[in-house]
Image: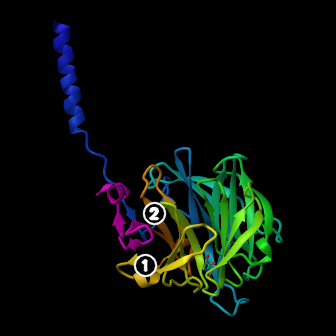
Amino acid sequence: MRNQIFFILLLGLFVVSCKNQPKPEPQYIVSGEKWLDTEGNAINAHGGGILFHEGTYYWYGEFKGDSTYWNPKVPSWECYRTETGGVSCYSSKDLYNWTFEGIALKPNLNDTLSDLHPSHVLERPKVIYNDQTKKFVMWLHVDSHDYAKAAAGVAVSDTPNGEFQYLGSMRPNDAMSRDMTLFKDDDGTAYHVYSSEENRTLYISELTDDYLNHTGNFTRNFIDQSREAPAVFKRNNKYFILSSGCTAWDPNQAEYAVADAMLGEWTVMGNPCSGKDADITFYGQSTHVLPIQGQPDAYVAMFDQWKKTDLIDSRYIWLPIKFTSDTTIDIAWNEKWNIEEAFNKE
Ligand code: DGJ
């Protein structure tokens, strides 16, 4: 009997102490602020994208050097540059707390002719996982110091955080390739989407089954419309492309387009942004759209807010996408928001 009373008292205490447990503080996405990793260092992952793999999000981006300079050898536009530090990788379970996993694709410090030498351009790395080869495949924009090379590089790894092995670069389909993204469709077919023809036309090119080459099946889209910074996502069997205009590091108006098939035809829908500074994408430029795992209608649009004279200090803007119909979206400015609240209400 005494034992029973003791047990009931203990249970009561346990229930009371559980009730008094403080609820975890909500965490927020605060666009434009300096975002720190779990060690307190500024997150250095620009022009990046996020891969979800086995319960973890991996954020890959340009690891920029800490001094920005103007390249006088490019007189036609404001070519601000910084040394290339390879591709960084951060991991997170909750999209708020990011752990630095290291440099997943390392710069090549010794060979001045290597695409990965710090004096060259490395931009917009994206990674997808190949279910057949079990490899992580990275594509990236590689360029000469004056952006004349206009090529795509490819690297491969057995693990999400690298180290990726660089396989080389090419001009896919014999055409220029600069700003780019990757998209892996539900059936495993992957596409490389890149600004070509001096950035005037956006190419969508199917990748081979191992994702390491192009099949030769490609389409030219938005011909002579000068779109860059492409980000692709799919919802309810509709494909969406978010992109920017071409104004170097300066912001301009975003645009989105919708299609029934990845290779097109694409219908231009206009500017998806609304609210303060929506006409210049909130001072940002698209880089990726992240589908949140396990939540069918939860997509986060990711932008870079470039600081052209101090590129390493460029900031990140992440905003929830609202679907206003099967083919229309709204990306409203919100300087501070919580992922759970944004997508769980209704
Ligand atoms: C805009 C592109 O989207 C960036 O990735 C970078 O190439 C800058 N232009 C360079 O000005």
The quadrant the N terminus occupies is: top left
In the image, what residue type sits under mark 2? Val
Q: Is residue 232 left or right of residue 87?
A: left
Q: Nearer the viewer, residue 146 or 40?
A: 146
First to last magenta residue range:
319-346
Residue 322: in magenta span: yes
> For numbered disc 1, what is the local secondary structure?
helix
Residue 285 colored in magenta in the image: no
Q: Secondary structure at mark 2?
A: strand
| The C terminus: image quadrant | bottom left
From the top left corner, tell me how far across and down residue 322 is, in percent. 38, 67
**Residue at image location 37% in from the left, 73% down from the top:** 332
Q: Is residue 208 left or right of residue 38?
A: right
Give the answer, above or below, for where 160 lies relative to 68: above
Give the labeled residue for mark 2: 300
- Residue 45 visible, this angle: no
Q: In the image shown, does 174 or 332 lie closer to the viewer?
A: 174
Cβ atoms under marks 1 and 2 closer than 8 Å: no
Q: Amino acid at mark 1?
A: Phe
Which residue in the structure is indicated by mark 1?
Answer: 282
Identify the mark at residue 59; answer none if there is no mark. Answer: none
Q: Could you give the CA–CA distance between mark 1 and mark 2, rounded to whole angstroms?
A: 15 Å
Between discs 1 and 2, the one toward the N terminus: 1
Residue at the (77%, 71%) spot, across then down: 172
Q: Residue 288 location, x and y as percent?
A: 54, 66
1 or 338: which is nearer to us? 338
Residue 191, percent across and down?
66, 64
* Circle 1 crowding by C-alpha within 10 Å: few under 14, some 14–19, many from 20: many
Q: Is residue 221 visible?
A: yes
- Answer with the quarter of the image where residue 18 lies: top left
| Displayed-image quarter of ligand 1 | bottom right
